[in-house]
Amino acid sequence: MHEPESDKPTIFLASVSQIKMAVATVVLFLAGCAAPGNPPPEFEPDRDPAIEQLRQRAQEAYELRDLPVAVELYQQLMQRTEDSTAARQAAEISAALEDWDGVDQAVARWLQLEPEAQAPLQFRIIAELRRGRAETAASRFRSELMPRLAAGTVWPTAVALFAAAGDARVAGQALEELLRTEPGPAGFGLLQQSRLAWQLGQQTQALELAQAAFDELGDPASALWLAGIADQLDQPERAMAALRTVRQLGRADAGMVMAESELLREQGRNEEALALLDTLDENTEVLYIAGALLEDLGRFAAAGATWQRLASLADVADIDRHAWLTGVLAEVLELDREAASWYARVGGAAAAQARLRQAVVLARLGRDDEAMMLLRSLRQQPGTEVLEQTWLIEGQLLTDSGHLDRAVALYSDALAELPDSIELLYARAMVAVRAEQLELAEQDLRTIIQRDPENPIALNALGYTLSDRTDRQREALRLIERALALDPENAAILDSMGWVLYRLGQPEAALEWLQKAAAAEAHPEIVAHLVEVLWQLARRDEAMQWVERHRDQFSGEDVFVDTLRRLEIE
């Protein structure tokens, strides 16, 4: 079978590693100095044609990855204009070329043009680190960058910058030097060393240092850090012990209690998680998580009442986050009208994602025209980060409403704009199969496989399509075998293996694979295939057991209903 699709929200409860480690995200212009950054943005045309020509030549050289020429042109541009973006681009490309003197020159000009900016100072510090000058990097951080940082971001920023050294020894030396000149309480240095080790991929060392820091400090910050690492390394009891210890000492804050609650949820201990949340004052996050937990437990009336309290909160710290979480919980609870209304209220950074969810919900409410207008308006916004998703969702809406040819045409328009999109190619292939445009489907799936030969989803999709819609069973088997080797537990691929063996006249061998697939996921298509094979093997009592078990659940699924009709099963 092909991979099933879902239109449900992808984020309900954040994992402990996402919301408990309490690490500030530091956005650097330079993540690794190993490759140039993003393409330079478009500029307003300069009145001087010579300057505009120089800018165009620099952009062209950059796009062609002729970096030595590009950096020389950007260096000229930064000196001849007041454009700080040219200086930034010169710094980025110089770093990619490991030309640290060039970085220094570009940063100096950048600071002339933007004296209050932090990014050029970050570049300068990383350049010192890449030269192996750990003490100088620490000194520059302390004297130049640290005074511009908010108190809570100083050490996370330092750790992130030092980790970009590309050399664990240099990074460690820089951190030690900063700790020498900016000491904290006992255990504080161990906590920062743990954070650096984690950033450098030294997981075992990071965990040991985190434990040592917690043993010294015993405070919420060190407990959250230890819990986050332990959870990432599949040691939930160790994570729980740290959080519980601080709570029992009366030092836990709301964030820690929520972290402990989330760990309990991950272990399937939802009632205990709810009991912990009940000890907290109600706010956006607490009510959202409580509502999702109640829904998981099947306590839908209580979940609905919790949503009502969430929606009624009057004094919220972040109105956009509150609107987003209220919309998500409403959608989880299948309150689609309410979800659409709340998604419409979301502004700020999450606005585009909220509009996508709003479009999906509107479509479920039968308001397809509104949904499509919303998606098209998103596409018209300059620089939208959800462009691909708007095409994918609109295409799915057309597919779901039976307009298969229109969906194929829409995806073709999308691919003209985003020709490198694997997701759009796959989406067009899947709807092309349904529209009986098998040549196009095969072409798209082979394009994906050519670009990514180890893509199990595309390999399986092509194999299953060839098996189900053509007589090319041996070719289909080879493709599905490749997919299975890459993802041996995938229910869709297990089903495809069973189906191709059945089509090859090997129903006994097929049955084993289909039983594995059904045990992994009782999807309508998997169950339909299993019923058909059992029926053909004259194991009709077993087939009827599967039919009766899922008849009501799959009564609206075409593949299941059609199989029963074809086999004349009442």
Image (cartoon, rainbow, N blue to C red):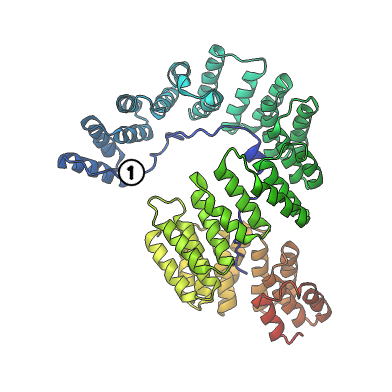
For disc 1, the marked residue is: 41
- Amino acid found under the numbered disc labelled 1: Pro
**Rendered location of residue 12, percent (x, y):** 65, 50
Where is the C terminus found, in terms of image quarters? bottom right
Q: Nearer the viewer, residue 181 or 502?
A: 181
Residue 116 position by quadrant: top left
**Rendered location of residue 495, percent (x, y):** 67, 68
Q: Nearer the viewer, residue 556 or 138?
A: 556
Horizontally, residue 261 falls left or right of residue 363, namely: right
Q: Residue furthest top?
A: 181
Horizontally, residue 22 falls left or right of residue 114, namely: right
Residue depicted at 59% across the width and 67% down the height: 365
Tag 1: Cα neighbours inside 10 Å, few (<14), some, or many (≥20)?
A: few
Residue depicted at 66% across the width and 36% down the height: 20
**Rendered location of residue 507, percent (x, y):** 72, 77
Q: Is residue 224 above or below residue 287?
A: above
Q: Is residue 519 above or below residue 313?
A: below
